[in-house]
Amino acid sequence: MSYEKSTGDTTSGPSKGCAGCDCGGGGAKPRTPDARRGFMFLLGTGLLGIGGILAAIPIVGYIIGPARSRYRNAWVELGELGQYPAGETRFATFLNPIRQPTDGDSAKTACWVRCVKSGEFQVFAINCAHLGCPVRWFAQSKLFMCPCHGGVYYQDGSRAAGPPPRGLFEYKWKVEGGKLHIDAGRLPGLEESA
Amino acid sequence: MSSGTIAKIVSVMKQPVQWIEERTGVIAFSAPLLFHHVPRSAKWWYVFGSATLMFFMIQIVTGVCLGTMYAPSAAEAWESLRYIDEDVPMGWMLRALHGWSSNAMVVMMVIHMLQVFMHGSFKYPRELNWITGVLLLLTVLGLAFTGQVMRWDQDAYWGLGIGAAIADRIPIFGDQARALMLGGPIIAGATLNRFYALHVFILPGAAIALVGVHLALIMKNGISEMPKPGAIVVPSTYRKEFEERMDKDGVRFFPDAAQRDMVFCGVCLIAIVLLAACYGPFGPGGMPDPTLINTNPRPDYPFMWIFGAVSLLPPASETAIMLVAPVVGILILVAVPFMSNSGERTPSRRPGMMLLAGFVVMAIAALTWEGVTSPWSPVMNAWSALPTPAQFVQGRTPLQMQGAVIFQFVQCRNCHELDGMGGQRGPALDEIATRMTADQMTRQVQQGGGNMPAYGKNLNSAQMSALIAFLGTLRPSNVSDATIPGAQLPLPISSVGVEVDSSSGLVNAATDGALTR
């Protein structure tokens, strides 16, 4: 065994396995090579353990960072009110306010804007409440349909048919300076509005 | 250079094998790997594991090659794939090989697993062979899913959306689980890079390590013999007797047994290269721009059965099933060798196990078929793209033809077939008038129900009259209209084979009556 070399004594017979066994027993013993070996082993274990934990903290923190961060939505402008005639539902897109430099097209987001009557809106997330596929608006039947599993919603976003457990997700909206704004960012999930 | 040195070099050159062997022990190490004894009975059933391993090696080589050109960035990944396909010499072929070989690897792995299950080869002492195999199955399926994400097209984007929606349903930690999976609050740059790290570092590393353990266990425990009825596994004596049989009657793995693996792997490899050359690479599909919503996301074949299952689950229990079923499924797979690790290995003596395997295979095949055809999905462009078959409009009144127009215009056709064309979400309506009266149809259209939205608010009474008049014509001419049993005056609503004047008059009377309730 390689560590035996450090004792300078290769004739001491079979090695004792865990050297730590020797050091605890006889307090009165002089400091033999075996005892030093036990101390070194403990020291090595301790130092590696501490170093490992110190290295693991940033690694684990880096990987689970996204789960710990609080991503804040922001108000996004969807354009002039004139684009959204009363009684109609229109397609709108915006750049997600929570985005990173490498996102490319995937930072683009789509939504459906329904102008209930002048000055009153409903803004629906594009994602079906079932499993997130993009729903499409059919103006003739005033229905949203999902291409994945056949979820159907009425024009007010309420569930009409199919597997969705709830209606479409809605964004908070406000009108400022003649323009429609929505509170957007996070991917809509079951526990939140949008 | 002294003459002594030259002589030394010459002597070394004379015996390079010994020179290397003395310094590495490579022959002592690998001789048992090649020449260990395997059962004489291990023939063509035993080739599928080798084929899986061969395709894994192809995946590593082609994957590393693709890694020299692929840009793992959400902004550029799709473009870089187009570039590899169209501008890089042999780029399309490398992508085709990687894609076809990945499917072949999954297929070979599943056949290998079924063979081991059928022949009871997981029994003592090979329980851990099976469990490392299950871990390999999960790793390879993980590679297949993350590989689909690497294409970074619309299927990848919305497939991740489905994954995110499932993660979101985890109680309490749903939000965190989803963020951990996506690398942020949305499907975007960080998501692709997470899956890239999984696909090229973590999962291949795990697979290589697991293959190593899997093979080491084969060396330790030997290849199991073909099962013989009555040759039961007794853990206390099995290993000794098996090793005696191998010493006495076994054949060398190389080349006696391996020649079959070589033939089979060669055929498979040629087939996959030809398929790749003829059919080319998979995708990428549409650009990963989430504002392009005219998309019809579908997963790759290894996951089609999950897509089918998710669609067919009853909504009330689907969250529980989606979250619990994978865990239970994996636990059952791991538990297989512990449920029975001794006794008979012959399929005919283990009818229950064979029934179970047959059931699982058929269930997955049926769900895959359902996923491919996905009859639950509305055909999104049926209303605008499909013609109304001539037999449903010939000889009809203007009112009925107006109804045919409305039928198409308000997207009924997206979910209902006429003459075999249209959606399959709802029933085909070719003969609806033989099953429902005008009143029943009016009620169904107005109020919906049974997976149909209510059209009451979206159709005015004139449109409704016309629609019901059209639906009333949908029956074969030799079958009478639906009637309500016991009703005094069944209302004929079809004009086919009836005097046009009186019947269409009755249609209006019937539907108007229904609408003015």
Image (tube, coloured by chain):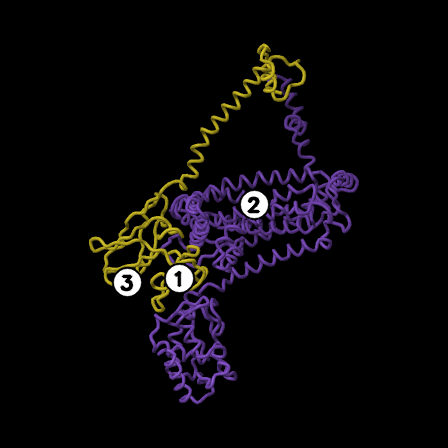
Chain colours: A yellow, B purple
Looking at the picture, tell me which residue is in the foreground, B88 or A66.
A66
The residue to which callout 2 is attached is: B58
| Residue in view at x 41 percent, y 63 percent | A152
Q: Amino acid at mark 2?
A: Ile
Q: CA distance from mark 2 to mark 3?
A: 58 Å
The label shown at residue A159 is 1
Tell me residue B68's x, y (percent). Answer: 46, 42
Would you say B122 lies left or right of B249 here? left
Q: CA distance from mark 1 to mark 3?
A: 18 Å
Q: Is residue B71 visible?
A: no
Tell me residue A52's x, y (percent). Answer: 48, 28
Q: Chain of mark 1?
A: A
Q: Crowding at label 2, few (<14), some or many (≥20) Cα neighbours within 10 Å?
A: some
| Residue in view at x 57 percent, y 52 percent | B272
The residue to which callout 3 is attached is: A116
Q: Is residue A7 visible?
A: yes
| In this rendering, the label closer to the viewer, 2 or 3 | 3
Looking at the rendered structure, the secondary structure element under dot 2 is helix
Is B246 drawn above or below residue A77 in the view shown?
A: above
Would you say B457 lies left or right of A34 here? left
Q: Chain of mark 3?
A: A
